[in-house]
Amino acid sequence: MDFEAKKPATLDEIRWRVARALDRHPLCRNVQFDVVSIPRSKKSNWTITLQSVAPEALWEASDIVADIQDAYELAVAA
């Protein structure tokens, strides 16, 4: 099995990364979102709620979020 472990990140770090990634895509610059902590599953322990997404930006925004979700997990608070 050849895969990289997800990097731990705080809610603020994830929020920042998603905001920067969406801002880099011309169709996604006005997308509003929120990062939500969810019970841990096999795939993730956080998700994004997308709000105010133009129809033409929905697929791009979803792909951007999925890529970030594949790379980061919500760090456990000490």
Image: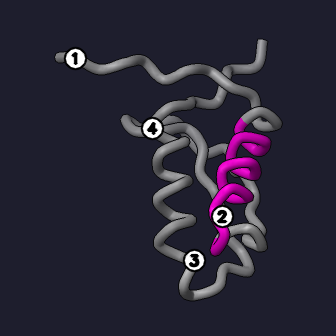
Residue annotated with mark 2: 49
Residue annotated with mark 3: 57
Q: Which one is earlier in the sequence, the residue at label 2 or at label 3?
A: 2
Mark 1 near mark 4, Cβ–Cβ under 8 Å?
Answer: no
Between the C-alphas of marks 1 and 4, the distance is 14 Å
Nearest the camera: 70 or 49?
Answer: 70
Count all numbered tags in the image, as a single digit: 4
Q: Which one is earlier in the sequence, the residue at label 3 or at label 4?
A: 3
Q: Residues within 10 Å of mark 1 (few under 14, many from 20)?
A: few
Which contiguous range is marked in magenta? 14-27
51 in the magenta segment: no
Between the C-alphas of marks 1 and 3, the distance is 32 Å
Nearest the camera: 33 or 77?
Answer: 33
Between the C-alphas of marks 2 and 4, the distance is 16 Å
Mark in the foreground, 2 or 4: 4
Tell me the quadrant of the picture where the C terminus can be found.
top right
Residue annotated with mark 1: 2
- What's the residue type where badge 2 is placed? Thr
Q: Residue furthest top?
A: 78
- What's the residue type where badge 1 is placed? Asp
Q: Residue furthest left?
A: 1
Tell me if residue 23 comes above or below residue 70 in the rendering. Answer: below
